[in-house]
Image: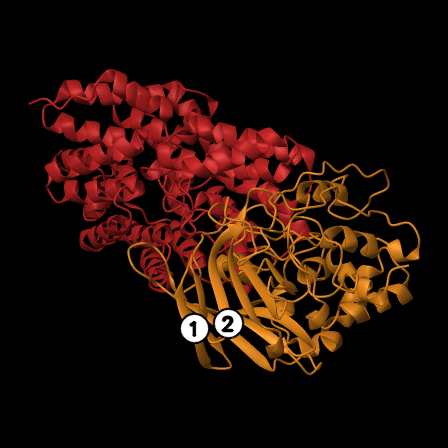
Amino acid sequence: MLSKARLTTAALAMVVLTVGAAPFLASGADHLESPNAKANTALDITDIYAFDAANASKTVLVVNVNPLAGVVSGTKFATNGEYRINVDTTGDAVADDVYRITFANGGPDGKQKVTLRRNGSTLLRGTTGNTSNAGGAKLFAGVRDDPFFFDLASFLRWRDPDGDGAYTYTGPTAFDGVDFFAGTNVSSIVLEIPDAWLGASAGVWATTHRNGSLVDRMGKPALATVFMNPFGGDDQKDPYNQTAPSADVATWGGQFTAVLDVFNSTPTAEAITGLLLPDVLHLDVGNLGTSTGTSFTGDKAGNILNGRTLAEDVIDLELFVVTGGLEGAAVLSTDGVDANDRAFPGTFPYLAPRN
Amino acid sequence: MTRRIPRSVAFLFTALVVAAASYAAAPLLQPDAFGSARPVPVPGAAGSLPGDAGSELGSVGDRLPLPARLSFWAARVEAAPTDFLSLVGLALAHAERARLTADVGAYEQALALVDRSISLVPAYPPTIRARAAIRFATHDFAGAEADARAVLESAPDDPSALAVLGDAALELGRPDDAAAAYARLEVVAPGPWLDVRRARLAYATGDRSGAIQLATRARAIAPDADPENLGFYHYAVGEFGRLAGDARMARIGFEAALSVRPDDPAALVGLARVAASEGSPEEAIAALERATAIAPQPESLALLGDLLAARDEAEAAADLYETVRLTGELGRLAGALYDRQLLGFELDHGGASEAILAQARASLEARPDAAGHDLVAWALRRLGRLDEAAAMSDRARATGIDDARVAFHAGAIALARGDARGGEALLREALARGPALDPVERAEAEQLLRG
């Protein structure tokens, strides 16, 4: 039986039920999931992660943007936008601490200038591609391997085998087990901060902003992708992304349950919804897992829904739970891809080097 | 000194021939028969919607060079042949190659790849949307429209599909349908990509000043972070200015486009037209030589040939004309892409025949717009079938379009039928629009007026 905590991440992504994406890509975790994100790939949050640092008294928060950087997206960070990591330390899904990361064009070497502020105070300045360390924080911003792994193409085939634009699966599952994101890059912001800044537990989500408007947000993986009009257009995704986490339950609870009803009984769907919203990543800071190698064995207490490590196979878990695994046999429990194609070094900035 | 383009080189050019246009791949700013296949704010290319289905077709930030992106997608397809997403990625990269290098074969590759992708996953809207863009670029307007409708069935507000729906309707001679699609697009995604489309619609329905205003507004609000798109919007202002006869506006627009994208063949051709109308053939020839080296389209090759012929460089001109004629023989797709350019070329270079007329009629049937009617009218005029020509010319003008070439053809037909007053008025009207007529057209119109 899955724990309540495990349920949480679970529903995360019936993944990619969506159209979306720039050219032809559908969302991965949160890649290119909404019109605003597609129009601003440098501000399109593909994933966020939170895990224990190599120094166990510190925590790593990662925000990735620019899906398929260099191929579909560019590689630079937006200079007319802002990246925020929001931290709720009181459990009300309202940010108590805000880490703002902004970029400016640099010199002829193409590197950008980066500034990190915490609650309005400048913590450090640096340049992309380099590690900066000051004021208790350590920051890297630059292109790295996309740690997300998922057989996106097989999933989309599975989702709609008869091509009628709706889920009508009746036969066996045949996944190729090919990681669509293998060999792809993202532009990554890696922030390492003392555990004390987070407290014993925290909720974390990232947002991006442009001209004062919110472009994208992400807490748990793929919620907008999966639950906002999954078989239709993109019309709900920007409104979802522009909702404050504190308003998630009231605004989107019904929608989540409706989607989960496809494979689950209504009581189970409602239970999963209650765990998914508000859309923030929950951190039991003292027990966060680490991101080394490619395997994931849970956090320090053996649980699986504490933050999100780089190696965590959120897709398998989500497929299992969303497709009815909690009520017996899951219609689909794995995409056949169990790990990233590149090992994680275990040291700052933790993500594998760019491809 | 004779400027001679070696035949082997010229032939190679044709073998590479471009499809529709320098920019996006499909005609929009003006119908083919008015002189060229014009860039289109086609999704994913210049003038595209943000994050559109074809961002592989346009430039997005600091992406890798096209060869690297082609290699990226090709390696993925080789490693996983059933990866339908990478198949589309590769298809769109080939479409971009076609647009940039004038390689019709690349369009054929793009179509084959996207069809293969759709055979694996038939109802995935982004791939159908990508095929819509490629079909539009290859002048399969009916196919593009069908794809757009298919996307809209599952995603009624899909901006890219609405854009293609409107664009295709306009190319197919249904401006009201285009207006309706653009009205829907305005609700979900207003922006310069919509304004420039409406500029084209305004021009096609006779509102020349409205076209300029809309194109100017599109340029004003276009983000300057994307050189390809910004260049396109500059180009659009220049082209609508040229069509309206405003040489100054046209030159400013084309030069601005070239300041952003120095190798923009469409802007080079536009600049050449302006220079030629201003009596600067050397500048025009230089611009055309650059344009044909980048994207050797029949229209620009013919224009260059005309200017060289006017300078008594008959051999070089003949070589270029031969290259133009070879274009249509390269394959079905090349013929389809350039049908109106090639037919118009023949009609203005002594090649009128019943076969040409039949081809013009077929083109009109496939694409019943003002340009199609005008082309048939001009073919009938060349064959001396004046009453039929007049009737067809009237139908072209009945669309509402207010175009110098249509006026020139209508004037010539009227004059031939004995309507000296009406014919001369139309010819003067056409000539008054300076760069809107090409040199051979101006020469013929002036000769007709001289009697």
Rendered image quadrant of residue B83 = top right
Does B188 sit above or below residue B384?
A: below
Which chain shows up in red?
B
Task: Specify the label residue A124 is tagged with.
Answer: 1
Q: Amino acid at mark 2?
A: Ala
**Residue placed at 63% from the left, 30% from the top?**
B81
Rendered image quadrant of residue B286 = top left
Residue with the mark numbered 2: A137
The residue nearer to you, when weighing B294 against B398, is B294
Whether label 1 touches label 2, CB < 8 Å: yes
Q: Is residue B182 left or right of residue A79?
A: right
**Residue placed at 11% from the left, 36% from the top?**
B282
* Residue that sits furthest to the left in the current view: B1
Could you tell which of marks 1 and 2 lies nearer the N-terminus? 1
> What percent of the width, then of the height, locates residue A270?
85, 68
Which chain shows up in orange?
A
| Mark 1 secondary-structure assignment | strand
**Residue placed at 48% from the left, 45% from the top?**
A71
- The answer as to whether the residues below labels 1 and 2 share one chain is yes
| Mark 2 secondary-structure assignment | strand
Q: Is residue A53 left or right of residue A211?
A: right
Crowd around label 1: few <14 · some 14–19 · many ≥20 (10 Å): some
Which chain letter goes with mark 2?
Answer: A
Rendered image quadrant of residue B350 = top left
Which chain letter goes with mark 1?
Answer: A
The residue nearer to you, when weighing A116 against B244, is A116
> What percent of the width, then of the height, locates residue B170?
47, 46
